Image (cartoon, rainbow, N blue to C red):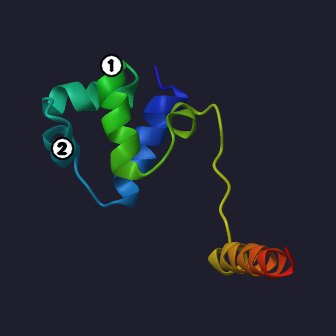
Amino acid sequence: MITVLSRNLKILRKQKNLTQQQMANILNVSQQAYARYEKGDREPDLSTLIKLAEFFKISLDYLSGRYVEPTFNTQSVNQMVIGQNIKQNINQSIG
């Protein structure tokens, strides 16, 4: 049965242009075990889920479908950080 987790695994793998065998090698499981993860016939254990989240640089919540990670405009984030740094420097100068 296809689950949010199994669907996300397939999408993420394809985005990286990897085969099921390559993912199985990364996770140190058989190709058949990984294929079952994508089909929803089997769920990875917690340590495997953590490896997947670290590999794809996503949260476990995102992987499981509990949370959709927002996409940030890198320039906006950088401007926000620079603005905070400037504010801190001003406050230190005044204080």
Q: Is residue 68 above or below residue 33?
A: below
The one nearer the camera, 95 or 40, is 95
Residue 35 relative to residue 15: left or right:
left
Q: Is residue 60 above or below residue 12?
A: above
Residue 53, image quadrant: top left
Task: Report the residue that reaches farthest toward the front.
Answer: 95
Helix, strand or loop for disc 1: loop
Please provide percent x and percent y for residue 64. 53, 30
Residue 45 numbered tag: 1
Residue 37 relative to residue 78: left or right:
left
Residue 44 visible in the picture: no
Helix, strand or loop for disc 2: helix
Give the crowd class for mark 2: few <14, some 14-19, many >=20 residues within 10 Å.
few
Q: CA distance from mark 1 to mark 2?
A: 15 Å
Residue drawn where x is 22% and y is 44% of the image? 23
Which residue carries the number 2 mark?
Answer: 26
Residue 82 numbered tag: none
Residue 68, image quadrant: top right
For badge 2, the amino acid type reads Ile
The one nearer the camera, 83 or 73, is 83
The one nearer the camera, 55 or 5, is 55
Please provide percent x and percent y for residue 25. 13, 42
Residue 23 visible in the picture: yes
Give the crowd class for mark 1: few <14, some 14-19, many >=20 residues within 10 Å.
few
Residue drawn where x is 35% and y is 17% of the image? 41
**Mark 1 vs 2, N-terminal side:** 2
Residue drawn where x is 43% and y is 52% of the image? 57
Residue 84, image quadrant: bottom right
